[in-house]
Amino acid sequence: MEICFNGAPQEISDGTTISAFLAERNLRPAEVVAEVNDEILGPDDLGRLLRPQDRLNAFRIVAGG
């Protein structure tokens, strides 16, 4: 199935969770803020299954001084 990740189409397997998708791209949930279809996700939401045409964005958290 196809989703949109950070503005680009991506083919993924049915049954892929948000957490698994991020892990496949070496994005650790503790280091990113994720949103699906303009909804910001909390840690408990990352087990949710992605659906066809979902729009997933992940923003890396950067800290500094």
Image: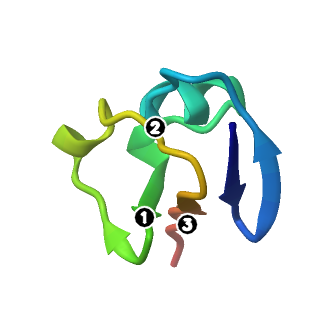
Q: Mark 3 belongs to which amino acid?
A: Val
Instruction: Determine which residue is flagged by label 2.
Output: 18
Tag 1: amino acid = Glu
**Percent x, y for residue 51?**
48, 44
Instruction: Characterize the local packing of mark 1: few (<14), some (14-19) or many (20 or more) Cα atoms within 10 angstroms.
Output: some
Vertical arrangement, residue 51 with respect to residue 42, above or below: above
Q: Are marks 2 and 3 in contact (CB under 8 Å)?
A: no
Q: In the current view of this chain or complex, which residue is farthest to the left?
A: 44
**Is 14 left, or right, of 50 in this rendering?**
right
- x, y (%) of residue 59? 57, 65
Q: Report the residue marked by disc 1.
A: 35
Residue at 41%, 77% in the rendered image: 38
For marks 1 and 3, give the one nearer the viewer: 1
Name the foreground residue: 56 vs 34. 56
Q: In terms of secondary structure, where does tag 3 sit?
A: loop
Distance (Cα) linking label 1 and label 3: 17 Å
Reading the chain from its start, which is encountered first: label 1 or label 3? 1
Do labels 1 and 3 touch, CB within 8 Å?
A: no
Is the N terminus in the top left, top right, bottom left or bottom right quadrant? top right
**Label 2 to label 1, Cα distance in Å?**
10 Å
Neighbourhood count class around disc 2 (C-alpha, 10 Å): few under 14, some 14–19, many 20 upward: many
The picture places residue 32, in percent across and down from the top left corner, at 48, 54
Q: Which residue is mark 3?
A: 62
Horizontal side, residue 46 vs residue 52: left or right: left
Residue 43 point in image, percent of width and height: 23, 43
* Residue kind at label 2, given as amino acid type: Ile
Q: Is residue 40 left or right of residue 23?
A: left
